[in-house]
Image (tube, coloured by chain):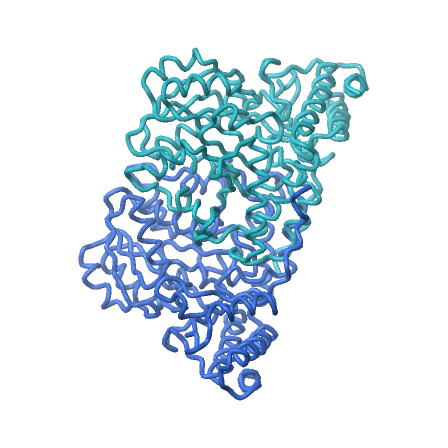
Chain colours: A cyan, B blue
């Protein structure tokens, strides 16, 4: 037998995702599979949808989980709203905005790209010229995983709607970590992922479509180019009719169900506050070492901390030692940030004081070995001071 | 807390899939999540690819698992091979052939449908007129889950290649249960699912592309319409380069890895023989009750037994009592078979003598309650006789 048993190393996942799966979610994954039309499974789907509506802060009936990762959710929202020749404004300030533009072009959209430098966010003024072209859809990333930038949505939404467009939001890294208000902000289509602030493995993509978006979908002149992601058919499986579409990913659905129960037990606002408290402690600790953020403080996501690799420090050596000696994964920089940035995620179950202290302790050790000058213990002391301030 | 804990009922899944997940696969699902670029995860991906090549009987480098269910695999194979305006022959003799035609049309193919009645299979002669139109791709379902019909592939492949076409095969329900010989039969693109004969939950789709198919993919004039399923990008993640595409579904990948280990431990030929032996016993048992198959014996899949609901017996009442009193799920008829057919799956871990006997015992009881006439115990005796003949 040349294929060894599975013995994954124990990791502390503090990168841009996946984050650590909660033990209760791992247990849920291992529960016995039932059929995808089993009355019990349909109940699980119902509960999952209700909890997702709570998480998205929406009454949208068409709220469910796509059977694929966050990128499948991106594709699902785009291809359902776009018909060939439709125009779509895509805001690009990192990898995922760029991906959305690619997805939209493949769907036949005339894409109008609006760009900002990496690490910055958009104001409605940045979009004015593009909106004057009366696009059908405006797509924007709320939590840009490649930069840690936190995009305010409300004003962009107003501007998009004033121009008559639908608003499509990437909330992959946002959901559960910071406020996402689908109804209050009038978001028309939104997608997320399970592996960020929801403490669940990757594999599903929570999505929600507003009634206005569903009208557009159901009024299309052409079929949605993807059969697998066609929301009008998925609505028949997730809705009252329960018409078989594809076989639901049963055990991953259990996992997401349990992950959503955890969020509801904690309370969504408490989850946001926890992500913020651990972020502030990490930030204080890093500041004590003189480590700066790549994003401006005004738009830094608490769950994803993109910081500049200190001068003279070997990016790859530190990441690799974190992993191999301490079992801690953090993320490398992508694209414009390659070799320059570390991405430190404090997401979902991973966002807790023990991880902040562990990370700072490990980082101090590795920086000291690289001859980086700082007061030993200063980062941990600063983080702990921040925690006591809060309490 | 209005959302109850997960306590799935214990089921014996003898429908058209999902089938019962093997306990070792459930354990694999619950192992700790690591990052999608973790050196350990890359090893798991390598092992999974090698084992999949063994299962598909191929040397194709481009053999991997799509991050979606079997229908995502269908879409992946179609959209990568088809460019708008290309012609594709699709063989339709059940639900899944029909689905493939829909997927191909959405990809912009000029679809030439060739049809056979439900429960029958195709000969090369059936395709002759369609092949004369020199299609780019011929698509066919090897194990039609809606009818239980077992389509021979080798001669169809020869005919397709003689006409200069690529051959695309749906092996969702086939793989692991009956011989699938990708290289020997010169299949150019093939997809399967995890939830049938592999004893794994639904959620991933094993696929393989021949070098000839990959040449076509890499020589496309237009981008693949799906970013998520673009095999040229997936090849960079699953290949040597390990370029991040989307976040791999880590824990489901563990599950498939363990499921493939189980097949390799048993031996693929032994798995085929086991599916056949349990099918013959079930068939003997059903024959003792006078229950007939919907498909001709010459083309009946061992892993999916589509049988005619006996006259005077209430289809839905029997299925519902099987589920509610005995925890046994079997499948209803779809489409042309609605209300007329039961689909009894003996797939993967579910294909074992204990399940054959349990099912026959439960069925006898329910048929007796409906006043159906037969010699009590006759089906179980017949199944057991068949098992002893074999040994």
Question: Nearest the camera: A386 or A189?
Answer: A189
- Position of residue A228 relative to residue A186, above or below, is below
Q: Residue at x 71, y 42 (%)?
A: A10
Q: Position of residue B147 (x, y in %)?
A: 39, 67
Q: Position of residue A326 (x, y in %)?
A: 74, 34
Q: Position of residue B282 (x, y in %)?
A: 51, 78
Counting every numbered tag in the picture gives 0
- Position of residue A343 relative to residue A123, above or below, is below
Residue A321 quadrant: top right
The extreme bottom residue here reads B375
Q: Residue at x 48, y 53 (%)?
A: A247
Q: Is residue A193 left or right of residue B129?
A: right
Residue B244 in view, yes or no = yes
Q: Residue at x 66, y 50 (%)?
A: B6
Quarter of the picture holding the N terminus of chain B: top right
Q: Position of residue A246 (x, y in %)?
A: 45, 52
Q: Is residue A360 left or right of residue B162?
A: right
The extreme top residue here reads A125
Question: Nearest the camera: B96 or B161?
Answer: B96
- Position of residue A195 relative to residue B383, above or below, is above
Residue A32 quadrant: bottom right
Q: Residue at x 54, y 71 (%)?
A: B270
Residue A5 in view, yes or no = no
Residue A53 quadrant: top right
Q: Is residue A274 left or right of residue A159?
A: right
- Position of residue B56 relative to residue A279, above or below, is below
């Amino acid at each position: 037998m040349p294929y060894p048993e599975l013995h994954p190393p124990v990791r502390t996942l503090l990168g841009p995702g996946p984050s650590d799966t909660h033990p209760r979610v791992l247990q849920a994954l291992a529960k016995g599979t039932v059929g995808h039309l089993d009355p019990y499974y349909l109940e699980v789907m119902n509960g999952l949808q209700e909890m997702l509506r709570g998480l998205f802060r929406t009454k949208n009936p068409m709220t469910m989980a796509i059977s694929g990762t966050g990128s499948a959710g991106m594709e699902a929202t785009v291809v359902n709203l776009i018909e060939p020749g439709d125009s779509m404004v895509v805001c690009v300030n990192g990898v995922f905005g760029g991906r959305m533009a690619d997805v939209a072009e493949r769907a036949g959209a005339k894409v109008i790209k609006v760009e900002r430098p990496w690490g910055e966010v958009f104001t409605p003024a940045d979009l004015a010229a593009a909106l004057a072209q009366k696009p059908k859809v405006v797509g924007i990333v709320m939590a840009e995983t490649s930069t840690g930038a936190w995009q305010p949505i409300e004003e962009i939404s107003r501007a998009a709607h004033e121009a008559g467009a639908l608003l499509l939001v990437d909330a992959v890294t946002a959901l559960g970590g910071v406020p996402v208000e689908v109804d209050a902000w009038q978001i028309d289509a939104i997608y997320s992922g399970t592996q960020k602030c929801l403490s669940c493995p990757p594999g599903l993509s929570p999505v929600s479509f507003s009634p206005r978006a569903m009208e557009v979908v159901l009024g299309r002149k052409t079929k949605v180019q993807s059969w697998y992601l066609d929301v009008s058919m998925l609505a028949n499986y997730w809705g009252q009719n329960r018409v078989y579409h594809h076989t639901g990913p049963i055990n991953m659905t259990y996992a997401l169900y349990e992950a959503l129960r955890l969020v509801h037990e904690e309370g969504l606002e408490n989850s946001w506050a926890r992500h913020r408290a651990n972020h502030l402690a990490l930030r204080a600790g890093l500041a004590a070492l003189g480590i700066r953020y790549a994003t401006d403080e005004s738009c830094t996501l608490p769950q994803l901390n993109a910081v500049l690799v200190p001068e003279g420090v070997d990016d790859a050596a530190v990441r690799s030692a974190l992993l191999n000696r301490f079992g801690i994964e953090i993320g490398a920089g992508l694209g414009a940030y390659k070799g320059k940035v570390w991405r430190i995620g404090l997401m979902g179950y991973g966002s807790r004081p023990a991880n902040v202290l562990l990370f700072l302790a490990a980082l101090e050790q590795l920086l000291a070995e690289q001859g980086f000058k700082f007061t030993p213990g200063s980062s941990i002391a600063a983080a702990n001071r921040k925690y006591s301030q809060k309490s």
